[in-house]
Image: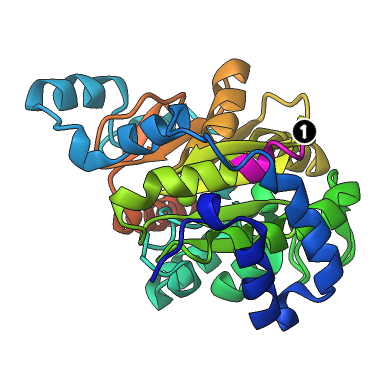
Amino acid sequence: MVISDAKSGIPMAIAYGMSDSTLFGNFTQLKKLLKKFETSQNGAKINALLDSMRASSPTRRPINAEDRNSWILNHPSALTMFEDIMSASKGKQIVVFLDYDGTLSPIVEDPDRAFITTEMREAVREVAKHFPTAIVSGRCRAKVYGFVRLSELYYAGSQGMDIKGPTKGHKHRKGNQTVLCQPAREFLPMIDEVYKVLTYKVKCIPGAIVENNKFCLSVHYRCVDETKWGELADQVKMVIKNYPQLRLTQGRKVFEIRPTIKWNKGNALEFLLESLGYAESNDVLPVYIGDDRTDEDAFKVLHDKGQGLGILVSKTPKETNASYSLQEPSEVMHFLKRLVEWKKLSPPSH
Ligand SMILES: [Mg+2]
């Protein structure tokens, strides 16, 4: 039976806390934390956040052919336009940035099972032989590395807040196994605390999963029945409003909770370009491929610079700062393979 937290308040907190002492560690501490939320429980209403959850559900947005055609005209396929794109990039150093979920791996119900295929891994490995290559993900760096397992790449985990260079030597390597950038380090204890509170708060909502991404958190609701979305949105908002230093954004069937510091995937992209020595260079062509709202920050950087290629992975028209599109991970893989083939056929630039 699911008991509404708003009705039962702290007594239920105690019951759950006691049943899961290993997760929450110091129970007294958790009790204190939960007390903060009690006063704001009642009267919570389904609000803008719920509307946003519904609006981002594709089943609610039938796409007509005319909309799709006009969107494709403005965001043509990066595969169809491949030759044109590449002829405009002659002599420039390509740097490849790849989101993980929904870009290299399919979106799956269980976020722990978002595996990359062997073929995709090989495609990324080949790309990294020819171009500096970075994975930029909302996941914690260790987790995304666990999926990709290529030590020759740069990894920017936690929405770009945890950046590390390649640990396997090759010509693009920079530094020596060091963490390059962790701008939100001071937020670690707070994120950890909110992870524990949120895990407790949403455990009565079937299908809700809180993922600790080290410098940020994700609350996945892909497997939550839509009738429970309002309750979930309320719980998440209620917790976050006690932490003004954190902010809440929404992705594909996921809430993202992160520090309010101005640092996102766009900053990670700029940081990596600078690390590679291309801060003010016109001789670089950053290629960023991603599928989510968080990738828009990176697309916007490229758009504002008037430099590089933003490629949105999407089957449906979406408002985006990307210039090109690919429909799904299999198309991303073909694009990466063509990039390698093109490089092999190109005369050496130096
Ligand atoms: Mg993604």
Q: Position of residue 340 (x, y in %)?
A: 46, 56
Residue 349 visible? The answer is no
**Amino acid type for the residue under numbered disc 1:** Pro
- Give 323 or 84, whichever is nearer the viewer: 323
Residue 97 lies, with reference to residue 155, above or below; the image says above
Q: 113 left or right of 29?
A: left
Q: 254 left or right of 243?
A: left
Quarter placement of the C terminus: top right
- Give 147 or 12, whichever is nearer the viewer: 12
The crowding category of the residue bearing disc 1, from other C-alpha atoms within 10 Å (few below 14, some 14 to 19, many at least 20), is few
Residue found 30% across the figure and 56% down from its top: 225
Residue found 57% across the figure and 61% down from its top: 210
Residue identifier under label 1: 244
Q: Is residue 239 magenta?
A: yes
Q: Position of residue 123 (x, y in %)?
A: 45, 65
Q: Position of residue 246 (x, y in %)?
A: 73, 38
Q: Secondary structure at mark 1?
A: loop
What segment carries the magenta color?
238-244
Residue found 17% across the figure and 27% down from its top: 68
Q: Is residue 226 magenta?
A: no
Q: Spot the residue most to the left.
A: 65
Residue found 61% across the figure and 55% down from its top: 9
- Give 294 or 176, whichever is nearer the viewer: 294
- Give 232 or 332, whichever is nearer the viewer: 232
Quarter placement of the N terminus: bottom left
Q: 166 left or right of 94?
A: right
Residue 330 visible? The answer is yes
